[in-house]
Structures are given as structure tokens and as C-alpha cells.
Amino acid sequence: MEKKLEETKIRFPQKFLAPIRELLERNIIKMKRTEKNISKADPFKDEFRGLRNSMEEDLDEQIGHFDSEIKVGFIKKQIVQLRKALTRMKIGKYGICEKCGKMIDTDRLAAKPETTMCIDCMKEAES
């Protein structure tokens, strides 16, 4: 049986959303800067890296590259989530669960302003 979406008509006032929007935008800038720094530290991007490394040095480079790739992937997902929250603000759906259509608890939004799902739908999605 499919869940019926309940569109909530309550919207947050712009005065409330403005500081949250600024916070989300600042976080995007920080995340992009962090992504750039992590990418620079990737040993595979070093043009002077040794082509005739010992096995240990080669392993260190492989691990460093893998570590960089994992971190950059995580940061990219975070940036997408931040942008998604900003988009939902623009279309007037910020604070409304994208899955069930109910209001997201304000304590949850205060702790994680980029969230787009209520806690129940998030738990369901993670299981």
C-alpha cells in the first residue's frame, strides 16, 4: 500500500528563513573550499610523484588517493543536500518532508537545517 502524500500548507516566514539560507550558503562555500583542499592533497595529483616508487611508497599513494576520493565523494553529497534544501526554500517547501509531505520537526531542522525528510521517513530510507 502506497503512502498518500499530505501537502502541508504551513510555510516559514522569510524573516525566519533568511538566516538559515545564509547558513546553508556559507556551508556550501566551506564545503567547496574543503573539497578543493582535499583534492590538492591527493597524491595522484602530484606531478612530481615518483614513478619508480618502492612498494611501500606506492601503497601509501594508493591509500592517500583512496582516502581523498572517499572524502571528496562525501563532501559532494553534502553539497547536493545543502543545495536541495535551498531549492526547497525557493519553491516554498522548506521544512516539509519530501517523502510524506508532513512538517519536519523544528528541533530536527535546528540541528540539521539541510534536512529534507522527517525523522520517520529518514529512518525508513536508511533501513
Image: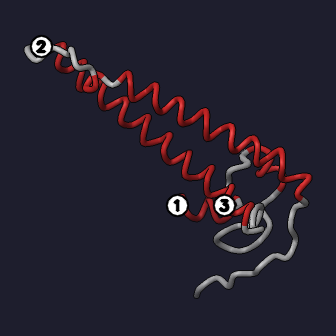
Question: Which residue is labeled 2 in the image?
Answer: 53
Question: Which residue is labeled 1 in the image?
Answer: 127
Q: Earlier in the sequence, mark 1 or mark 3?
A: 3
Depth check: 85 or 14 in front? Answer: 14
Depth check: 114 or 107 in front? Answer: 114
Q: Which mark is residue 87?
A: 3
Q: Earlier in the sequence, mark 2 or mark 3?
A: 2
Quarter of the rendering occupied by the N terminus: bottom right
Label 1 to label 2: alpha-carbon separation:
44 Å
What type is the residue that disc 1 sits on?
A: Ser
Q: How is the image coloured?
A: secondary structure
Mark 1 surroundings within 10 Å by alpha-carbon count, few (fewer than 14), some (14 through 19), many (20 or more): few
- Secondary-structure class at tag 1: loop
Comparing marks 1 and 2, which lies closer to the viewer?
Answer: 2
- Secondary-structure class at tag 2: loop
Label 2 to label 3: alpha-carbon separation:
47 Å
